Structures are given as C-alpha cells and as structure tokens.
Image (cartoon, rainbow, N blue to C red):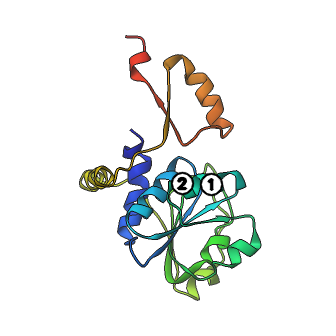
Amino acid sequence: APLLCAGITTYSPLRHWKAGPGKKVGVVGIGGLGHMGIKLAHAMGAHVVAFTSSESKREAALALGADEVVASRSADEMAAHARSFDLIVNTVAAPHDLDAFLVLLKREGAMVLVGAPASPHPSPAVFNLIMKRRSLAGSMIGGIPETQEMLDFCAQNGITADIELVRADQINDAYERMLAGDVKYRFVIDNATLAA
C-alpha cells in the first residue's frame, strides 16, 4: 500500500526531473516519503544525499541507499554542498526555511515540494531563485500509467516500503506513536485483524 502513496509521490518528481546517473539528488526528510525517495533515487543511479535534522537517522539513511547524509542544522555541512544539486525532493510536512535548500541548487536546479504542511512555508527569497534560474515546484501523486511504471520499476529493483504491520487493536497506539514521530517509516493495518 505505501508504494501507491509514498512510492508514486516521490517517483513522479524523480522521473520528471530526470534523476539518474550523473545527477546529484537531495532528499530532505527521512520519513515515510523520504525513505522511498532515497531508495528510488539510488535505484535510478543518482548520487543521493539525504538531509535530516535528526542525527540519529544518519545510519538509517545510508542503509536506505544514500551516498551521503547531511545534518540540515549544521551550517558547515550545508555550506559544503552549496550550488551542487541538480534536484532536491523536499518531503518535510512541516513549515521550514526553504532558502537553506534553494542555495544548494546549481544553476537551473529544481527543488520539488512533496510534503504538505498544515500551514505555509515562509516565502523564499526571490534572488535565490532568479540569480541562478533555479526552480521551486510542487508535485503530487502520478496518474495510472506512471503508477504502473513505478510499480514495475520497484519490482525490477527489489524496492519495497519499510513498514510496521499493526493489528486493528493497535490502531490507537499506532496513531499516538505517529504523532510522537515514533514510526519507522509507515504503519500498515493488518486487514485480517479487522472485525467482519
């Protein structure tokens, strides 16, 4: 089930902006969307850099296929990647400073927002976009043909979503854990445990 949500949500912009060999792709956030973005970009052959505000996720990001991990709260680590990305897929669903990532794009690079925060991001500085012809875009899920393409790609490359299967009687606990950020990466409800 997560491939039909997180899978296609991250596959679509990676495909549209031609992630692949010779491209440097950043994935901001290592959650339900981000973990799929890392796996997919890696399988496409891109050089993948994962951005996280949580140092504890560094090893997990590498295990998912990231070539590098950047602590987004470290000014030095961020500055080391200035003007070097072809594409950044931003999966974070909380308002944050987009400029910190826009300056990492090379000329004509694009940052695509796929995370949907409840309140708006602060508006980016226009000069960070126009001086290097950078793009800020959004992307949602794909259509049926692209979703089938994504499923075929995942099957060919052995890509699955990392999930935790929960019983029906664990739904409330799973919801509380999700609110607390205690989920690795998606919960899936076991339908066999639902009352008929």
The reply, left or right, for residue 134 in relation to residue 42 is: right
**Toward which corner of the image does residue 58 lie, by quadrant?**
bottom right
Name the spot of residue 71 as percent of width and height, x first.
69, 63
Q: Residue at x 38, y 50 (%)?
A: 159
Q: Amino acid at mark 2?
A: Ala
Foreground of the two, 102 or 181 = 181
Q: Which kind of residue does numbered mark 1 sit on?
A: Glu
- Distance from the alpha carbon under mark 1 to that under mark 2: 6 Å
Image mark count = 2
Q: Hey, which quadrant is residue 170 in on the image?
A: top right
Tell me which residue sits at (39%, 75%) in the image: 21
* 1 and 2 marks in contact (CB < 8 Å): yes
Quarter of the picture holding the C terminus: top left
Residue 145: in sight, yes or no? yes
Q: Vertically, is 6 above or below 163?
A: below
Numbered disc 2: secondary structure: helix
**Can you give x and y, in whole percent of width and height, for residue 67 in the image?**
54, 66
Measuring from the top left, give residue 121's x and y in whole percent: 64, 61
Q: Is residue 23 above or below residue 176?
A: below
Which residue is at a point 42% across and 79% down the rendered structure image? 22
Q: Residue at x 41, y 65 (%)?
A: 14
Residue 54 in view of the camera: no
Residue count near mark 2 (Cα–Cα under 10 Å), binned few <14, some 14–19, many ≥20: few
Q: Residue pushed farthest bottom?
A: 131
User: Label 2: which residue?
Assistant: 63
Crowdedness near tag 1: few (<14), some (14–19) or many (≥20) residues, C-alpha within 10 Å: few
Quadrant assignment for the N terminus: top left
What residue sits right under mark 1 in the picture?
59
- What kind of element bears circle 1? helix
